[in-house]
Image: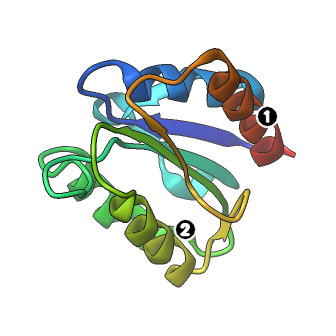
Amino acid sequence: MKTAVIYWSGTGNTEAMAKAVAEGAGTEAISVSDFSGSISDYGALAFGCPAMGDEQLEEAEFEPFFTGIEKELSGKRVVLFGSYDWGTGDWMHAWEERVKGDGAELVGGEGYITNLDANDTELGELRELGKKLAE
């Protein structure tokens, strides 16, 4: 199954998470600004975006991208991940509901979040999540 790991990162925290997921999935992590493929070419996708502002997806680049492709997620395996600095994870819960509502299978049952940068244990868990995604 063809797998993509697409992310947006402002500080590098979510980029490190994306690289761990991609390593586990046996693919490369692609910044959302560099993604030029078609979502329809992939059976499994991982998306990474940190919490921004009032616990929402990054608005200038990632949110418009995701809004444009989310209806194509039906029947696909999806992993969501991101980091945050404060809050309760509301951005991730809302994102999970969007993906499930679009008919995607959320691998792991929920998104994966870390507070600021992921530690070695969390990066290992993200690699395992990437492996599950690509199965």
Mark 2 Cα-neighbour bin, 10 Å: few <14, some 14–19, many ≥20:
many
**Number of the label disc, if any, that sits on residue 128:** 1
Q: Which residue is mark 2?
A: 73
Amino acid at the residue labelled 1 = Glu
Mark 1 Cα-neighbour bin, 10 Å: few <14, some 14–19, many ≥20:
some
Instruction: State the residue in front, 81 or 86.
Output: 86
Q: Position of residue 110 (x, y in %)?
A: 62, 62
Q: Position of residue 129 (x, y in %)?
A: 74, 41
- Measured along the vertical axis of the image, is residue 110 above or below residue 29? below
| Mark nearer the viewer, 1 or 2 | 1
Disc 1 or 2, which lies upstream in sequence? 2
Q: Is residue 59 left or right of residue 3?
A: left
Amino acid at the residue labelled 2 = Leu
- Which residue occupies 34% across, 18% down? 12
**Number of the label disc, if any, that sits on residue 111:** none
Q: Is residue 23 left or right of residue 60?
A: right
Quadrant location of residue 132? top right
- Which residue occupies 79% across, 34% down? 128
Q: Position of residue 36 (x, y in %)?
A: 39, 37
* Coloring applied to the structure: rainbow
- Which residue occupies 53% across, 27% down? 17
Residue 37 seen in the figure: yes
- Measured along the vertical axis of the image, is residue 83 above or below residue 56? above
Q: Position of residue 11 (x, y in %)?
A: 26, 20
Q: Is residue 54 left or right of residue 84?
A: left
- Measured along the vertical axis of the image, is residue 88 above or below residue 86? below
